[in-house]
Image (cartoon, grey):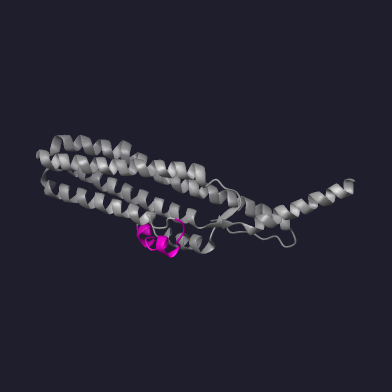
Amino acid sequence: MATKQRFPGQALASGTVDEILNQILVTRLQRKAKAAIISSLQFLVTDLIILLTALDYEIEDEAIKIGIYVMVGIGAFYVLALSMFLFIHAMCFTAKEGVTTVKEVEDSYTKTNAVPLIDSILELPLPAKFRGSTWYLPYIMWSFFAVIVAASTVLFVIERDQVSDSTTAALVTACLLLYQLTGDFSEYWVLSRNQVKNENEKEVREEKGVLAIADGFLEA
């Protein structure tokens, strides 16, 4: 997040910076949703196709194959539903003026995002720490992620001798994409739950109103 600059004695200039930061906030939330949606598309379009194609030739046990198809289908539904939810929410509920993220929340994610790969794990306590409306939703999503990955892993371990290295790589990639998608959703949700009115913008608007009234008197 950009560092807020101050211009002593220039309230309007400071207000302009606050307005720019406010626009960055909205864009950042939408970028976070966009990142998750891109991850979901990569899962659906790339790894899912590779996975299903490979399994069609490698798994001989029909019961195991059906079980894997079911779990892959559940994973695809999870990804599709979550990405659609993110898209609708980002488009309809985050494009608001005059709001900013609570500084403590922003600082917490700045620290965790500095640690790649395990940043989503480090962020697990944050939804409970920074509670907002429906704060528990990320934990429900993480539960779905854990069930999908655990069940799929068990099925593939049973047939590990028949799974090629390329399919294994696709499976690992799919799991990482699910992990990334769920982590991005969690961060997006916590940020969107912890927005407050930008008081500096309010002051600037009030000052603009006073100046407009003064100009009106002068013109009269």
Q: Which residues are magenta?
A: 118-133
When the figure is inspected, residue 28 is found, relative to residue 59, above or below; the finding is below
Q: Position of residue 141 (x, y in %)?
A: 34, 52
Residue 55 image point, x, y percent: 17, 38
Residue 191: give x, y in percent of width and height.
48, 55
Q: Position of residue 132 (x, y in %)?
A: 46, 59
Q: Is residue 120 magenta?
A: yes
Residue ID at (33%, 54%) = 140
Q: Is residue 107 left or right of residue 80?
A: right
Q: How many marks?
A: 0
- Is 193 inside the magenta-drawn segment? no
Q: Specify whether residue 104 is in view.
A: yes
Q: Residue furthest front?
A: 133
Q: Quadrant of residue 80?
A: top left
From this viewpoint, which residue is outermost toward the right? 220
Q: Is residue 198 left or right of residue 218?
A: left
